[in-house]
Image (cartoon, helix red, strand yellow):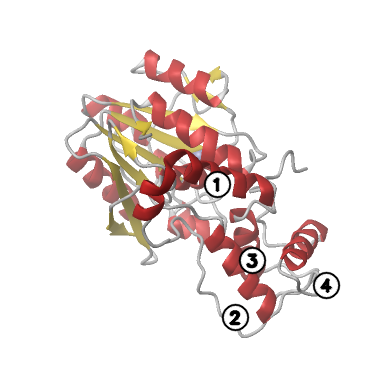
């Protein structure tokens, strides 16, 4: 089931390495930790989830266990089973709590502390809400790197159940400072879908079939192009920043897209750096209404899809190696 899991030691080592490499200068510059993506630290439930339960509350606990690397990212289905219990026992042992595997106030406090400790110094200097979802959730963009350098963008979780890419996004927003690019990151483009662990936007619309490029009406496309609020939000944002490179993260097809590829060099750099095969992700024949198709057809820059598999890579790999690989592929680097 879980391939590899980041150990606490691994995570600590990862961030310690960052501090060691960057030395006291960056440590002194480290700004207050502000968790990004979906890691909420403010949950104060009135009751606590219990073993065997299936609920959104369980998913909230699982998402935090995932964020600290104690649970593989695909195990966020909201069902409180043996793996969730084992991860809780590990957490309780770490914080000298009774290793019951049950959730209570002390365990929740320990979990929030662990999430805060697993979050490195931030790279970003600007955050904005670029729009709201159908259900009123904020869609946030973060800006890192250097203004005036080539604009690049990484976006994840436009399909709400595809939650791995947000951890790559988070890796770009933490650690040593980023240079050589003007980087925008949207960790979660479909926050309603993420909250419900569901692919679709409200009303069963597939965000990645709703763009005005080769649009056709069919199941889940929406009644017309750009009918969904989220589609219009991202179109407006892309038109504003017009990235040279746009990398869109999905799962589970495990590859870097070759279908109608606009910039083969970018594709090759991503495939090599991320250790993913090149694949034609042709939407079962031909793609209609996709974000990358729309962007490639209407702007000078190049958009491309990356797909992780159905099981997650370790948190250290997604936030560390893979975030750095995508950064390098779009022309950025970490300052030394
Ligand atoms: Zn997808």
Residue 16's disc is 1
Say left or right for 85 vs 328.
right
Q: Earlier in the sequence, mark 2 or mark 3?
A: 2
Q: Earlier in the sequence, mark 1 or mark 4?
A: 1
Distance from disc 1 to disc 2, alpha carbons, whole Å, reads 33 Å
Q: Nearer the viewer, mark 4 or mark 3?
A: 4
How packed mark 1 is, by other alpha carbons closer than 10 Å (few <14, some 14-19, many 20 or more), is some
Q: Nearer the viewer, mark 1 or mark 4?
A: 1
In the rendered view, tell whether residue 294 sits above or below residue 282. Answer: below
Distance from disc 1 to disc 4, alpha carbons, whole Å, reads 30 Å
Residue 135 percent location from the top left of the image: 39, 66
Mark 3 lies within 8 Å of ligand 1 (Cβ measured): no
SS for dot 3: helix
Along the line of sight, the residue nearer the viewer: 206 or 11 = 11
Residue 267 percent location from the top left of the image: 43, 19
Residue 231 percent location from the top left of the image: 32, 47
Furthest toward the front, the residue is 24
SS for dot 2: loop
Total marks drawn? 4
Residue 61's disc is 3
Residues at discs 1 and 4 in contact (Cβ within 8 Å)? no
Residues at discs 1 and 3 in contact (Cβ within 8 Å)? no
Residue 141 percent location from the top left of the image: 32, 51
Distance from disc 4 to disc 3, alpha carbons, whole Å, reads 15 Å
Q: Earlier in the sequence, mark 1 or mark 2?
A: 1
Q: Residue shown at 28%/52% (left/top)? A: 125
Residue assigned mark 2: 45
In the rendered view, tell whether residue 288 sits above or below residue 264. Answer: below
Along the line of sight, the residue nearer the viewer: 56 or 260 = 56
Residues at discs 4 and 3 in contact (Cβ within 8 Å)? no
Residue 100's disc is 4
């Amino acid at each position: 089931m879980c391939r590899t899991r980041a150990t606490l030691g691994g995570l600590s080592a990862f961030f310690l390495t960052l501090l060691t490499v960057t030395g006291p200068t960056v440590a002194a510059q480290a700004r207050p930790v502000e968790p990004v993506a979906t890691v909420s630290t403010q949950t104060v439930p009135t009751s606590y989830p219990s073993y065997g339960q299936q609920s959104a509350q369980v998913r909230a606990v699982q998402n935090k266990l995932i964020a600290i690397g104690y649970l593989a990212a695909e195990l966020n289905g909201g069902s409180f089973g043996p793996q969730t219990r084992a991860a809780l026992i590990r957490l309780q042992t770490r914080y000298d709590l009774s290793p019951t595997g049950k959730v209570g106030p002390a365990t929740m406090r320990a979990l929030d502390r662990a999430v805060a400790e697993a979050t490195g110094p931030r790279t970003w200097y600007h955050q904005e809400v670029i729009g709201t979802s159908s259900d009123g959730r904020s869609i946030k963009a973060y800006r890192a790197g250097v203004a005036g350098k080539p604009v690049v963008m990484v976006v994840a979780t436009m399909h709400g159940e595809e939650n791995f890419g947000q951890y790559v996004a988070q890796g770009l927003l933490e650690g040593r400072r980023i240079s050589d690019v003007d980087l925008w990151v949207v960790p979660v483009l479909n926050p309603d879908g993420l909250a419900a662990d569901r692919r679709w936007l409200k009303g069963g619309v597939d965000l990645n079939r709703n763009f005005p490029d080769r649009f056709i009406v069919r199941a889940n496309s929406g009644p017309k192009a750009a009918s969904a609020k989220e589609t219009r939000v991202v179109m407006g944002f892309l038109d504003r920043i017009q990235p040279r490179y746009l990398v869109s993260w999905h799962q589970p097809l495990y590859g870097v897209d070759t279908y109608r590829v606009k910039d083969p060099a970018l594709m090759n750099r991503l495939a090599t750096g991320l250790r993913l095969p090149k694949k034609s992700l042709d939407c079962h024949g031909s793609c209609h209404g996709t974000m990358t198709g729309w962007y490639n057809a209407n702007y000078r820059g190049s958009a491309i899809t990356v797909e992780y598999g159905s099981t997650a890579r370790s948190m250290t790999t997604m936030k560390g190696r893979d975030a750095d690989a995508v950064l390098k592929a779009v022309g950025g680097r970490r300052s030394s």
